[in-house]
């Protein structure tokens, strides 16, 4: 059974930092691209970042570029999101999600999601 | 970036009827469009990918269609568990983007 378990959320002051983690199980983590998607309270979904299976290539939304960094440790089946210079607008539930196999290969469609971890940026 | 516009924002329907949800892209995304369902307090669930392919375990009453800029998610006969918010998402180019969502509520 595929499981994704996020941790590391909490309350942080504006300008502060947090490091989120997502531990994966039930699938071959090292062959799948992984993603972070967030959802502000009462709002819709916003893609944040993606990372290829090897970790060599990363992609970011403009709203987080230069402040958030995605990485992965395939030996530990773990995805990370380092969050620096946090702003009130970063307040959201952060979900990690796994890439789907779309026939031609693994693709940026999210077929399994964690339960999310809440990040609140407030003074 | 590609903007996805979903309509209507809210759909008020009775169980047993057909639901038709729309997603329009600001430029062509080919067939690279997915649909998700989200219930309160839960993570989203993948329903359809690449416009018309149902994900594993998704009931046949859910179907997707369209290509280019206009896409539709159809629920042929609403079950009580289908009342939720639905999002479309494109993977045609970076940045990945989602639509604003359609809430399907009980009439």
Image: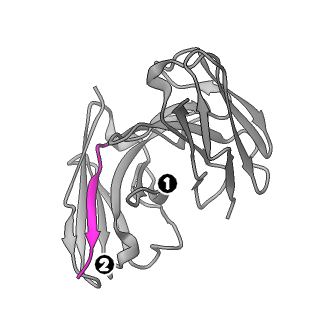
Give the magenta-colored segment's residue range: A114-123
Position above or below: A79 against B21: below
Q: CA distance from mark 2 to mark 1?
A: 23 Å
In the image: residue A86, left or right of residue A61: left
Image coords of residue B103 (percent x, y): 54, 41
Q: Per the image, is A115 magenta?
A: yes
Q: Classify B16 as above or below A36.
A: above
Q: Residue at x 21, y 75 (%)?
A: A12
Secondary structure category for the residue under label 2: loop
Residue at 56% across, 20% down? B78
In the rendered image of this protein, does residue B98 appear above or below residue A86?
A: above
Position of residue A94 in the picture relative to residue B50 (left or right):
left
Disc ID at residue A44? 1
Residue B35 percent location from the top left of the image: 58, 37
State yes or no: residue A86 in magenta: no
How crowded pointer 1 is (Cα within 10 Å; few <14, some 14-19, many 20+) is rated as some
Q: Position of residue A81 (x, y in %)?
A: 31, 63
Quadrant housing the C terminus of chain A: bottom left
Q: How is the image coloured?
A: one colour
Q: Quadrant of the N terminus of chain A?
A: top left
Quarter of the rendering containing residue B50 = top right
- Give the image quarter of residue B75: top right
Which residue appears at 58% of the width and 56% of the height? B96
Q: Viewed as shown, does residue A87 lie left or right of B5?
A: left
In the depicted view, which residue is nearer to us: B46 or B61?
Answer: B61
Q: Chain of mark 2?
A: A
Q: Position of residue A71 (x, y in %)?
A: 33, 61
Say which element carries label 1.
loop
Residue under label 2:
A84
């Amino acid at each position: 059974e595929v499981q994704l378990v996020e941790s590391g959320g909490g309350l942080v002051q504006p300008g502060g930092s947090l490091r989120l983690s997502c531990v994966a199980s039930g699938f071959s983590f090292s062959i799948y691209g992984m993603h972070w998607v967030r959802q502000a309270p009462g709002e819709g979904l916003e893609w944040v970042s993606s990372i290829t299976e090897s970790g060599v290539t990363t992609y970011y939304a403009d709203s987080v570029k230069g402040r958030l960094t995605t990485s992965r440790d395939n030996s530990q089946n773990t995805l990370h999101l380092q969050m620096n210079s946090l702003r009130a607008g970063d307040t959201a539930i952060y979900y990690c999600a796994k890439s789907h196999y779309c026939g031609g290969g693994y693709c940026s469609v999210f077929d399994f999601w964690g339960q999310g971890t809440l990040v609140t940026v407030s003074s | 970036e590609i903007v996805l516009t979903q309509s209507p924002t809210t759909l008020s329907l009775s169980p047993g009827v057909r639901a038709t949800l729309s997603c329009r892209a600001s430029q062509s995304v080919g067939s690279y469009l997915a649909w998700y369902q989200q219930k309160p307090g839960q993570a989203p669930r993948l329903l359809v990918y690449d416009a018309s392919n149902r994900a594993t375990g998704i009931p046949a009453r859910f179907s997707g269609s369209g290509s280019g800029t206009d896409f539709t998610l159809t629920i042929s006969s609403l079950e009580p568990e289908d009342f939720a918010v639905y999002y479309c998402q494109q993977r045609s180019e970076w940045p990945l983007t989602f639509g604003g969502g359609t809430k399907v509520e009980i009439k």
